[in-house]
Image (cartoon, rainbow, N blue to C red):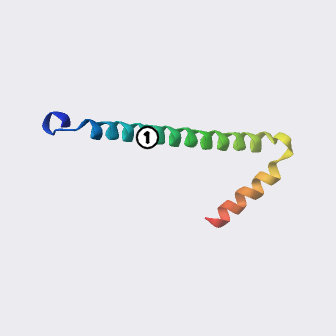
Amino acid sequence: MAAAIFTVKSFTRTWLTSGFWIAYVYIACLLILSLARFAIGLAADFAARRNIFWLRNSIARERGIVAYRA
């Protein structure tokens, strides 16, 4: 729609296309990293509830440190 109103040179058009691709990749990486962070949090919660590897005291100590910092 904007191309119909404004005259866009081919050089500018390639820069716009590259910019949009960079933005899409950036957003996709942020989404992947946030999902990974969420999954790690779920895994830590599961480990704490089931006491997997006998780590309940270590996880509780770490959560206490985080709560104290907040």
Q: Secondary structure at mark 1?
A: helix
Q: At 52% from the left edge and 40% from the top edge, which residue is drawn?
A: 29
**Residue corresponding to mark 1:** 22
Q: At 19% from the left edge and 37% from the top edge, which residue is drawn?
A: 2
Q: At 61% from the left edge and 44% from the top edge, which residue is drawn?
A: 37
- Quadrant of the rendering where the C terminus is positioned: bottom right
- Percent x, y for residue 6? 15, 40
Q: Residues within 10 Å of mark 1 (few under 14, many from 20)?
A: few
Q: Is residue 19 left or right of residue 59?
A: left
The foreground one among 63 and 26 is 26
Kindly give the residue lying farthest to the right in the view shown: 54
Q: At 47% from the left edge and 42% from the top edge, which residue is drawn?
A: 26
Quadrant of the image occupied by residue 40: top right
Q: Is residue 11 left or right of residue 49?
A: left
Exactly how many numbered labels are in the figure? 1
- Residue type at mark 1? Ile
Q: Is residue 24 left or right of residue 63?
A: left
- Percent x, y for residue 30? 51, 43
- Quadrant of the rendering where the N terminus is positioned: top left
Q: Is residue 1 left or right of residue 47?
A: left
- Percent x, y for residue 61? 77, 58
Kindly give the residue lying farthest to the left in the view shown: 5
Kindly give the residue lying farthest to the bottom in the view shown: 69
The foreground one among 53 and 23 is 23
The foreground one among 39 and 28 is 28
